[in-house]
Image: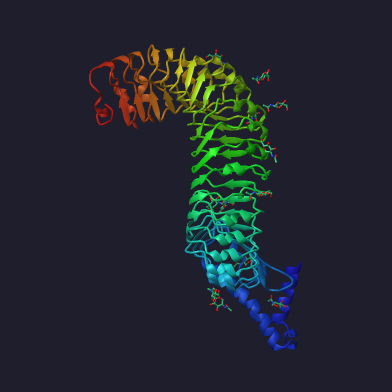
Amino acid sequence: MGKQLFLILNSIILNSIILWRWSSITICRAYSQNQTDRVALAFFKNAIHEDPLGVLSSWNDSTHHCEWQGVLCRKRHPGRVTSLVLRSQGLKGFLSPYVGNLSFLRVIILQNNSFHGEIPPQIGNLLRLRVLYLSNNSFGGLIPSNLSRCSNLEILNLVDNRLVGGIHSDLGSLTRLKLLGLSTNSLVGPIPHSIGNLLLLRQLSLANNALSGEIPEELSRLERLILFQLSSNKLIGEVPAGILNFSDITIFSVAYNQLWGSFLNDVGTTSPSLYFLSTTDNLFTGMIPSTLTNTTGLRELYLDHNNFHGPIPKNLGRLKGLYFISFCYNHLQDDLSFISSLVNCSNLNAIAVRGNLIHGSLPKSFCNLSTSIHRIDMLENQIQGTLPSAIGNLFNLSALGLSNNFLISRISDSIGGLYKLQQLVLAGNMLTGEIPSSIGNITLLNLLDLSFNIFQGYIPQSLDNCKQLIGLDLSNNNLIGSAPVEILSLSSLTIVLSIANNNLSGSLPLQVGSLKNLGILDLSHNRLTGFIPTSISECLVLELLHLEANSFHGQIPEALRPLRGL
Ligand SMILES: *[C@@H]1O[C@H](CO)[C@@H](O)[C@H](O)[C@H]1NC(C)=O
Ligand SMILES: *[C@@H]1O[C@H](CO)[C@@H](O)[C@H](O)[C@H]1NC(C)=O
Ligand SMILES: *[C@@H]1O[C@H](CO)[C@@H](O)[C@H](O)[C@H]1NC(C)=O
Ligand SMILES: *[C@@H]1O[C@H](CO)[C@@H](O)[C@H](O)[C@H]1NC(C)=O
Ligand SMILES: *[C@@H]1O[C@H](CO)[C@@H](O)[C@H](O)[C@H]1NC(C)=O
Ligand SMILES: *[C@@H]1O[C@H](CO)[C@@H](O)[C@H](O)[C@H]1NC(C)=O
Ligand SMILES: *[C@@H]1O[C@H](CO)[C@@H](O)[C@H](O)[C@H]1NC(C)=O
Ligand SMILES: *[C@@H]1O[C@H](CO)[C@@H](O)[C@H](O)[C@H]1NC(C)=O
Ligand SMILES: *[C@@H]1O[C@H](CO)[C@@H](O)[C@H](O)[C@H]1NC(C)=O
Ligand SMILES: *[C@@H]1O[C@H](CO)[C@@H](O)[C@H](O)[C@H]1NC(C)=O
Ligand SMILES: *[C@@H]1O[C@H](CO)[C@@H](O)[C@H](O)[C@H]1NC(C)=O
Ligand SMILES: *[C@@H]1O[C@H](CO)[C@@H](O)[C@H](O)[C@H]1NC(C)=O
């Protein structure tokens, strides 16, 4: 309605004699103001050289510029542009400096286009600007220091561009900012202390840059933060005390830096909303404090690749909403008793504790974990005892990894109940008995690694049901019998097929030529006999072929000679 009215007024003023009754000064001012915006928009359009969705085709002479798609004016200042909203339009080009003449602009939203070149410093003339979304474009150059003149800015989102240089400390004068997003650029230098003046800030995201130096102490004043994202920079030093002491903090990540100290001790007492916490890949020390479980909303906890030591809190199960816990590669010493406390976490999706000093045997409660669990990664620990037979209860598991532990005894047939399993890696244990033929029931399996155990008996033929297998490693066991034709012809195999270092006998079937996409074939150190079938040269992408230490006779087929490993 309002716009209709503008249009009518517009044509009256431009075309009727009413015009002449107005003082010429008023008219000229009104006219020139409106023209300024129209001209600025025309220059904006001109600087864009690709408009695949044709959004700018409505920007033509036949309509008032307030009618143009993505342009918004307000009644109060007729003809003056207040918003420019053109997100996800595939626009390619420069952002014209003329945009700085749209002096009534409050909102610029150009995110997810292909703007390149510099962010025009003329934007600093837009003193009414509240929202500037330029995220997900290809803007380069520096963050214009003139942006700090836009003292009404509440949202400054420049995430995912190609900005270089430092973060100007003047940005700290934008005290109305609620969101400062500079992630995923190529920014260097320190985080200015002045950012600590942005007391209204709700979201601070500086991740994926090359920022260096320490996290300024002053940031712990940003009590209203809900998102604190500093991951993947070059930050050093300690995380200032109290920085996690924000009552609304929801997402906190300082992953992939070189931070140290034991700041986790501060977590929990006053951050009930914390949902996502990541310290991955730093130099943090200390224990995982049991107070952590006061953050009752915690769903995802990533502490991988640090120097945390001591046990895993036994009350972790207080965090009923836990979804993902990942503590890989620390020095955690635990007897697995934390597992029992997790049985009430009904959304638990993954437990990853690879590369620690976890010992003891898998408790019975292991199989009472929620069936929501998809991923268990406990590789490279000191876990003893057996794989519980009730493991089949965890029927939603898609990855089970227990390689390089001290597991003994047989694997129960019930493993075949894990029919959604895609990766089963149990290498480097002391597992014995036969490989359960029920594994053949796991038809989604794409990686099976049982190497370096003491498995005996025959390779189950049923494995040929696993038509998704891309890697199969049964090497370094005590397997006997022949190498089953069905498996030596599983055309899904692409990465590796190894049955090396067993006691397999018999000859190599012709069908081995079906392994057309296989990179590594290792049959070495067995008792295979007969001729090497020439069909093997149909394995076109083989990079590594090991046949040595068998009793093959005859020639190696010509085509195979250049291969490594022979
Ligand atoms: C001008 O814009 C109007 C919509 O505002 C559109 O209907 C018309 O097709 C456009 N004219 C041209 C030549 O693109
Ligand atoms: C120009 O602005 C004046 C007031 O600033 C307004 O009355 C008039 O309708 C506008 N004209 C156009 C063409 O939008
Ligand atoms: C980004 O823009 C493209 C069109 O250029 C669109 O297909 C895509 O869905 C947009 N992405 C998001 C996250 O909005
Ligand atoms: C608008 O901005 C441009 C470039 O920043 C400038 O050259 C021009 O003089 C400005 N004024 C008007 C009224 O267009
Ligand atoms: C960013 O842009 C690319 C390419 O247009 C698009 O595929 C992607 O979905 C966009 N992402 C966001 C968050 O807008
Ligand atoms: C940047 O701001 C300064 C004043 O702080 C001003 O003199 C200069 O003209 C501005 N630059 C542009 C391109 O608007
Ligand atoms: C955390 O907040 C509480 C209450 O708001 C306060 O008493 C305490 O001193 C804060 N701790 C730090 C380290 O800032
Ligand atoms: C925090 O956790 C500790 C240990 O779990 C507990 O003793 C303490 O009462 C908790 N504090 C709050 C404020 O919930
Ligand atoms: C799990 O929940 C039940 C019922 O709420 C409770 O009795 C039991 O103590 C809880 N177990 C653990 C390990 O927290
Ligand atoms: C596991 O669950 C079953 C039934 O749901 C229950 O009988 C058994 O006591 C539980 N075992 C452990 C160790 O919690
Ligand atoms: C687990 O599997 C069941 C049955 O296939 C399915 O209904 C359920 O949604 C799965 N749970 C999760 C959390 O994926
Ligand atoms: C699972 O495998 C075993 C042994 O190969 C077989 O006897 C059984 O019928 C299979 N079960 C299903 C549900 O396919």
Image quadrant of ligand 11? top right
Residue 24 location, quadrant: bottom right
Residue at 67%, 28% in the rendered image? 344
Residue 270 location, quadrant: top right
Is 19 left or right of 342, judged from the image as shown? right
Q: Is residue 54 above or below residue 507?
A: below
Where does the image place residue 71, in percent across and percent down from the top left?
Answer: 65, 66
Work out which quarter of the rendered image holds the N terminus and state it: bottom right
Is 80 left or right of 535, judged from the image as shown? right
- Count the marks: 0
Is 553 left or right of 67, judged from the image as shown? left
**Front residue of this view, candidates 405 and 113:** 405
Residue 415 in view here? yes
Where does the image place residue 383, in percent across and percent down from the top left?
Answer: 50, 23
Residue 86 in view here? no
Question: Colour scheme used in the picture?
Answer: rainbow
Work out which quarter of the rendered image holds the C terminus and state it: top left
Q: Is residue 432 above or below residue 254?
A: above
Where does the image place residue 33, in percent across and percent down from the top left?
Answer: 65, 78
Residue at 43%, 24% in the rendered image? 472
**Front residue of this view, candidates 24 and 109:** 109
Residue at 65%, 27% in the rendered image? 343
Where does the image place residue 237, in percent across and percent down from the top left?
Answer: 50, 50
